[in-house]
Amino acid sequence: MKSLLRYLPTTIDRRVRVIAWLSLVCQILLIGTGGAVRLTGSGLGCPTWPRCTAESFVTTPAMGINGIIEFGNRMLTFVLAIVVIAAFLAVIRMRRQRRDLFVLTLLQGLSIPAQAVLGGITVLTGLNPYVVGAHFVISMLLVVLTTILVYRVYNGRRGAQALGPAWFRRLAVLAAVFASAAVIMGILTTGSGPHAGDAATPRNGLDSELLSHLHSWPAYALFACTLVLVVGARILRLPGRRFFVALLGIEVLQIIVGITQSNWGLPPLLVGTHMVLAALLTAAMTASVVSLRTSRFAAPGSPATTPTLADAQH
């Protein structure tokens, strides 16, 4: 055990940065594959849990493409578990100097069994739309968590000083509220429509057309807020202005995809793209808000001292 610990990082090096990025990428990929499961009606491709059938942990030829898709999503969860363990081990020797990274990786690790249990409940309840929705909400929260992890790896611990005027910070928080509302309404809309699962999957019984309108309102409000934030961040020359620009770009794509999928009868590929873009939007929104506070590193010469993101790019 001691010999293993010797090889673990004591500073924020390339290994830590790569693992942090892998954590975020895997969370977004898991949302994408989870969407594929739902959009192809494969939620019960493996009808039991934790086994795929009563006799086998893996899919069988008789289960066809639906079994492969569902089993593939389950396998990605195991890949994510390996990455999460690696992330925890990557910062464990820095737990005193970088307690923030230790807590973030620990919370991510605790999410694995929680998601596994909720995934099992999802299957055992026959894809109850509210349980499926809760599964998606936790996935989005993990995108938030891993985005903060990546940001803190590059930029240090949360500082005490806020950046930008108070109105700007309040508007950023309001934008985050609108983003959260859009995601929640999107979950409810999907749970009421044709992509809640196959024909036998229960829907939540809500009005899909009404929900689609309610889903668009916070999305457009978010877009309006982001336009002001991008202009304000540029005028104020805030260090995190690139995150607001990225957020605006993702929103434009999301609006285009959302309108197109609605007019084209909700083709599964566009709906899946909409879900992945929602995860990317959540990441960009998180980075934007987190960037509105100064960061600080461990004392010079300490094991956790690390370069800034700007330094790392040179």
Image: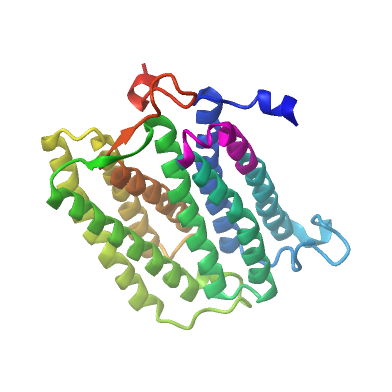
Q: Position of residue 250 (x, y in %)?
A: 33, 46
Q: Is residue 151 above or below residue 195?
A: above
Image coordinates for residue 186, horizontal then vertical, percent: 40, 66
Q: Quadrant of residue 158?
A: top left
Give the x, y percent position of residue 96: 50, 36
Apparent side of residue 72 relative to residue 299 in the rendered image (left or right): right
Q: Main secondary structure of the magenta part?
A: helix
Provide residue 68's location: percent of width, then percent of height.
72, 54
Confirm whether the magenta stretch covers residue 90: yes
Asked if the stretch drawn in magenta spans residue 66, the answer is no
Where the N terminus falls, by quadrant?
top right
**Would you place residue 233 above or below residue 214 in this image?**
above
* The C terminus: image quadrant: top left
43 displayed left or right of 257:
right
Q: Nearer the viewer, residue 196 or 135?
A: 135
Q: Quadrant of residue 120?
A: bottom right
Identify the residue at horizontal 31%, vertical 55% (top origin). 255
Image position of 128 with respect to 302: above or below: below
Q: In the displayed structure, would residue 88 be above or below residue 60?
A: above
Q: Which residue is situated farthest in the left direction here?
A: 235
Q: Which residues are magenta?
A: 84-99
Q: Residue shown at 39%/62% (left/top)? A: 183
